Image: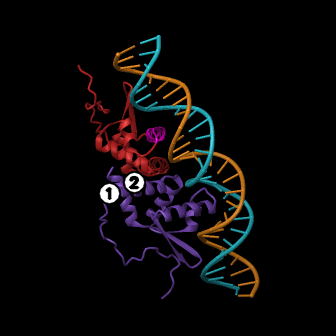
Chain colours: A red, B purple, C orange, D cyan
Amino acid sequence: MATPSTALCPPPGRPQEKPDLRPVEGPAADEELALLCKAAGHPARVQILRLLVRRDACICGDIVDELPLAQSTVSQHLKVLKDAGLIRGEIDGPRVCYCIEPHVLRRLKALVGSL
Amino acid sequence: MATPSTALCPPPGRPQEKPDLRPVEGPAADEELALLCKAAGHPARVQILRLLVRRDACICGDIVDELPLAQSTVSQHLKVLKDAGLIRGEIDGPRVCYCIEPHVLRRLKALVGSL
DNA sequence: TTGCCATATCGTTCTACTACGATAAACGCA
DNA sequence: TGCGTTTATCGTAGTAGAACGATATGGCAA
């Protein structure tokens, strides 16, 4: 098969509809909420999240082009989001394709919603 | 009338059911989301928020008693939350009664929900 | 007034974050 | 193999955050 130039990061064959059974309160949940909020607590990272949600997946270079920041700075922000679990990066040849981790984003929404 | 020793911070006669009409996307919304998330991005501050949501209002001293931190440190965290608009502090005699700003908390939920 | 209580602010120290340019690493292609 | 492209990492500098003890402030009671 031909290699598509626009790679889609999340393989479509995984709906991942398993509900998250972890509690939304308690010390562990508080830590998790703080961690995720901290990761989202920067305008550039919010922009990246929105970009990935809107585009469903995005090549790193496209993200760099969208933000008024140096490439190394964007790479650092991507690392923060990746370390928090909110996004995932898949190597696609010489490029890296980033995408949202939908269950972690849902988890963030659930935790914030529990406040 | 007698002054009640347990002051309730939000005066009950204000339902504040006005819906927030500001957009949940765009540059301003991104900034706002980042700001609120940053304020919530620390375990101690999450604990404070939960405390205030659960108890509806709380004397500063009670918050200090609940957290394993020095009084001055808790005071700083309260200031961060207050500067972000998430909580409000009303002076009640020699004490200060803190409470959630419900519409700002709702705004945070709406912004996170828009991701 | 004097003193006590609750809270905020100050000053300090240490750590973490943010941003950048420079460089390294990984990959495809000629 | 060697080159250009893409992304990550390193090193650095400046700023901000987190924690504490000490101190100031402001109100109430004696």
Q: Is residue A87 left or right of residue D27?
A: left
- Tell me, yes or no, if residue A115 can be seen here: no
Marks 2, 1: nearer the viewer:
1
- In this rendering, is residue B85 above or below C2? above
Q: Quadrant for residue B31, please give it.
A: bottom left
- Tell me, yes or no, if residue B94 can be seen here: yes
> Which amino acid type corresponds to the residue marked 1 in the rendered image?
Val
Disc 1 target residue: B24
Which chain's residue wears label 1?
Answer: B
Residue B82 is covered by the magenta coloring = no
Q: Quadrant for residue A65, please give it.
A: top left
Marks 2 and 1, how far apart in space?
A: 15 Å
Q: Position of residue B112 (x, y in %)?
A: 36, 53
Q: Is residue D26 left or right of residue B1?
A: right
Q: Position of residue B70 (x, y in %)?
A: 64, 59
Query: Which of the two residues, B11 or A47, is positioned nearer the viewer here?
Result: A47
Q: Position of residue A17 (x, y in %)?
A: 28, 39
Residue A73 is covered by the magenta coloring = yes
Question: How many residues crowd around disc 1 within 10 Å: few (fewer than 14), some, or many (20 or more)?
Answer: many
What residue appears at the point 26 percent right and 32 percent down from the top-left corner? A12
**Secondary structure category for the residue under label 2:** helix
**Secondary structure category for the residue under label 1:** loop
In the image, the segment drawn in magenta is A70-83
**Which numbered marker is on residue B6?**
none
Which chain's residue wears label 2?
Answer: A
Q: Position of residue D20 (x, y in %)?
A: 68, 57
Give the prevailing secondary structure in the magenta stretch.
helix
> Which amino acid type corresponds to the residue marked 2 in the rendered image?
Val
Disc 2 target residue: A112
